[in-house]
Amino acid sequence: MAIPDSHTRHLFFTGKGGVGKTSLSCATGLALAETGKQVLIVSTDPASNLDEVLGVTLGQTPTPIPGAPGLFALNIDPEAAAHDYRERMVAPYRGLLPAAAILSMEEQFSGACTMEIAAFDEFSKLLGDPAATTQFEHVIFDTAPTGHTLRLLTLPSAWSEFIDSSTGGASCLGPLAGLEKQQALYAATVAQLADPARTTVVLVSRPETAALREAERTRAELADLGVSHLHLALNGVLAVAETDDTIAGAMMRRGAEALAAMPAGLAALPTTVTPLLPLGTLGLDALRQMANPALIQAPGDEPDSDCILPGKLSGLVEELAQAGRGVILTMGKGGVGKTTLAAAIAVALARRGHPVRLSTTDPAAHVAEAIGESVANLTVSRIDPAAEVAAYRAEVLAKAAANLDPNGRAMLEEDLRSPCTEEIAVFRAFARAVDGGQDAFVVLDTAPTGHTILLLDAAEAYHREVSRTQGDMPEAVRQLLPRLRDPAFTRVLVVALPEATPVHEAERLQADLRRAGIEPFGWVINQSLLASGTRHPLLRQRGVSEAPFIRQVADQLSQRCALVPWLSEPPVGSDGLDQLMQ
């Protein structure tokens, strides 16, 4: 089988960004529907590309997929969910409270925290309330990249524990106000997740070390949550006869080495293998081929592409270096190589003699491993959510506890145990990291698109709060949004692969950035097979198909862009990262 064969009602597809979760979940849903089942596919990713893969515009209610009887899909839209949630909380008080009080309530419900709670609320209804999906025999969840998904899967437990431990009814944050009523629903959600007769979690991975490491981390964390019915789906495996093509040989060798080193716990899971396909997986015909590789025609002898390729990454770095300081953000869909590119740019700037700080907002990123040995002028760190939460709680208690009686302190401690506290603590750490760009280069590798958008929404919400209250707020937080909007201080690099979904998702990210008043500095198109020089028929066909997306970025979407080829040697360690500049 090229796709998972599971009989549970609920299936979760999760994994590192860019491993093919959406394609595999859609191919599985389509295959089930074509056996006569009623199937609903749900995207929980704030940056969903379900519409593009299925070829239909989706909303927040089940939409039938043309050409696939029995198949339906919907997106959990965090913004729309937050609007509905806000209205449910505020509407009962309209006409009863003064306008200023209503405005204050709306402000409290306008941040990223509300968006996450509201999206989680919608997710819980679909999983924890059988009546909400009673017409479907299977409900398939296409999830955001791993870090965000693990948070989503742990939220039922986190909120249940928080509500259970709340004795004082405290809530410094308005968004929490409606949670207690949902306790039974969250308990049912936890039960559904842990029941192997009802739920299967499919860990999707490429045959790559980083993706398999991410799958193992997820397996271990799900085991801690009591979720044990797991399946490993290896996607994009290149398995051909002997080849003298350097790129194809390197791709197969690296894949074989990664699979041979796979942790025992992961290797013991039931596994399916989906081969690397010659073209993308957009539309129902492509999804049918993904589920049935025997339907795929062998690559033909196509003519070489006459696509004019953009310049190298070294040219972009030369422009960045001229500023002498500031913040550089790499942003994009999961799996496009943001961490590697951030590390390569940091090393290149440090080698030019600039002081550089490399960090990440992505809980799943490994910037230190990307660099390897130490490099002069370069310091490497990461924003650790657990450490940031501990520091934030200690700071708040130290400031406020002296003026509180025992009951007041107990209520404050209760509030600080809320999962929302992590959002605030990580956001403040992000603001501090940006602040460092005043006297050095700060290169920040950001989490995949959806989570980054929530971070920027938080910046907007905090900025509104600053404008409204001028209250007690660190200077770094106060200055965050103006600095992100300052093109002389912050330079955003949008990263994409030369394929339909990564480019179109990056295009949406660019539109979101512009709405926030942030203009990207440039684009980097990563891992191009067209620029790699491969002559292998399958890889060459994939390379030729990149041409329109490369030109779309260069001609229509970017002020400046650079192209990085797929490399036969992995870009790991400072010397390996230097390859990206050549």
Image: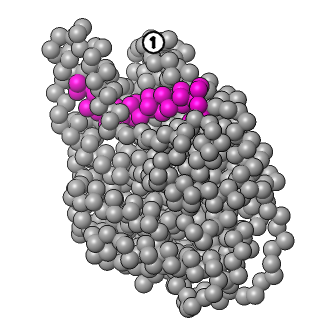
On screen, residue 276 above or below 379: below
| Front-lying residue, 460 or 192 | 460
Q: Residue at x 77, y 83 (%)?
A: 302
- Residue 420 inside the magenta-drawn segment: yes
Q: Which residue is mark 1?
A: 471
Q: Secondary structure at mark 1?
A: loop
- Residue at the farthest bottom position: 241
- Asked if one can make out residue 456 in the rendered structure from this viewpoint, the answer is yes
Q: Position of residue 223 (x, y in %)?
A: 24, 60
Quarter the N terminus occupies? bottom left
Range of the magenta residues? 413-442
Q: Position of residue 40 (x, y in %)?
A: 44, 64
Q: Position of residue 380 (x, y in %)?
A: 47, 42
Figure quadrant of residue 482: top right
Q: Main secondary structure of the magenta part?
A: helix
- Asked if one can make out residue 504 in the rendered structure from this viewpoint, the answer is no
